[in-house]
Image: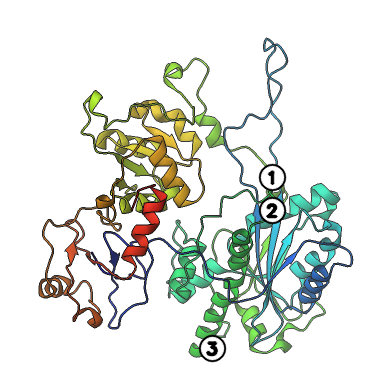
Amino acid sequence: MFGQLVQRNQTSRVSRAASCSPLASPPPPASMDPAPEPPPPFPVHLVTGGGSSPELALLLRALAAARIVALDAEWKPRRRGTPAAAASGDGTSPATAPAPPKFPTVTLLQVACRGGEGERGEVFVVDLLAVPLADLWAPLRELFERPDALKLGFRFKQDLVYLSATFAAALGRDAGFDRVEPFLDVTNIYYYLKDHDRKKKLPKETKSLATICEELLSISLSKELQCSDWSCRPLSEGQIQYAASDAYYLLDIFDLFQQKITMEGKCSSTTELTLDSHCSPTVIECSSSGHDICSGGYLMSIVTKYSEKILLTESDTKPRSSRRKEKLKLPNNAKCKDKVDCSTEWQGPPPWDPSIGGDGHPKFLCDVMIEGLAKHLRCVGIDAAIPSSKKPEPRELLNQTYKEGRILLTWDVKLLKYQYLANNQVYRVKSLLKHDQLAEVIDTFQLKISEDKLMSRCTKCNGSFIQKPLTLEEAVEASKGFQVIPPCLFKRNLEFWKCTDCNQLYWEGTQYHNAVQKFLSVCNISD
């Protein structure tokens, strides 16, 4: 019914069709949902053995020869609301004192190594649950402190804190890590490439790594597995690929940074990166150790002028409970205690139920953690809004939910204890992947999805379509200054549809039928 329009920097992919990008030539086909990631364009070495393991030996050789190393780490996400200790036997004695807070245990370390200029690099995914930490501690510590090896990371200070605590817990207090230098944060590189005014402070809301890769490399990093349980074994192929990509693409981002410096000829002492709050600024001097880092050529001159370092203080190594979390705890004598139900199961009826005065049209609000579910709901014809701000407060979400008669869909269990403010209109989604989330919501709320409702809403803004389709001439006129319709469509007899809210144009493209089949399957609709 509608056609394909690909918008590179838009979240919209397909609505009653796929959306179109302002390109002069026909864009590549877009899918309804981001297709499974293709195999990464680089080899990935999964390191799971110790001692004489060939994978571990290859990793240690790569670390020793590396001139540029990109680092990342994964750990099991902590679930809020889990009691630290249970009450004693008969329930009459007071609960035991809560266990002291602990840092998460790092279960996966990703390392992308490059030995010299022009090399593509190798990527290692190190399973810290399988590799003896004693075999890794000395090589990692040497790497972190080697002045002739530049380390790259994305907000790596927290990773270093958790990594240090993991090694210290396994090997003793002195087996942690307290520094990484020379170091370069990808966030700072991003703002340098974007010509951010270095006299001004960096924005408080920093970009995510997925956003940085999208803007700088035109690569879409799926973050569906970000909150998966990284302590479960075996790791899936998707988890290994996700973890490897987070480290590997840091090297490509650094290449862009190096190219810009080379083109501008600005490798001089007068140009510096703006540093964020995660790291302390420093300049690595050529004489700071026995290594002559200036002899490495242009790369090391960049290190000299732009590098920084991460230093962990004593306070960084001590986990502490969040004071803000403590303030949010409800006292035992709270007036709303009887109204709070933190059950993760839905208790209806929903606000659109005609038996309680609803209009019979399901409406949802997806919080920022599951915005991808909102697009899936729109694709099957369900009204699904997203918060107006990037970091909404719980009360903002609940106010919008109540005023618009929606169900708030969230991953955040803490929102359940505030749902009395929105008349029990909060549901915690349990599934991780978007297709599973969609099936869960359909089943939980007994939604009736019909084939004629598929692709019936704008995936970009949640708006509806005009009642009458546009001709090609009308579509071309409507797209002026907004979209470019690929010339290859001019000879096809197509109908165009326009969103009444954002004016986005849609038409039936080659991906439409594949998308319909996908959602027919997810929604269990007979073709």
Q: Which mark is residue 262?
A: 3
Image-based side of 168 in relation to 441, left or right: right
Tag shown at residue 416: none
Relative to 433, is 40 above or below? below
| Amino acid at dot 3 | Thr
Q: Is residue 474 visible?
A: yes
Q: Position of residue 352 (x, y in %)?
A: 26, 32
**Percent x, y for residue 31?**
38, 66
Count of numbered marks:
3
* Tag 1: amino acid: Phe
* SS for dot 3: helix
Which label number is shown at residue 103?
A: 1
Rounded to the nearest angstrom, the CA distance separating label 1 from label 3 is 41 Å
Q: Earlier in the sequence, mark 2 or mark 1?
A: 1
Which residue is found at the position 46% from the left and 28% from the top?
417
Which colour style is shown?
rainbow
Quadrant of res 20: bottom left
Q: Is residue 28 above or below residue 179?
A: below
Residue in the picture at 76% in, 80% down: 287
Q: Position of residue 247 (x, y in %)?
A: 62, 68
Q: Secondary structure at mark 2?
A: helix
Tell me which amino acid carries mark 2. Val
Please state the horizontal and vertical placement of residue 183, each as a whole percent of the image.
65, 70
Going 63% across and 66% down the picture, which residue do you hit?
A: 244
Q: Residues within 10 Å of mark 1 (few under 14, many from 20)?
A: some
Q: Is residue 312 visible?
A: no
List the residue tagged with mark 2: 161
Q: Give yes or no for contact between labels 2 and 1 (Cβ–Cβ under 8 Å).
A: yes
Which of pointers 1 and 3 lies earlier in the amino acid sequence?
1
| Vertical side of 431 occupied by 402: above or below | above
- Quarter of image, res 176: bottom right
Question: Of label 3 and label 2, which has the lower sequence position?
Answer: 2
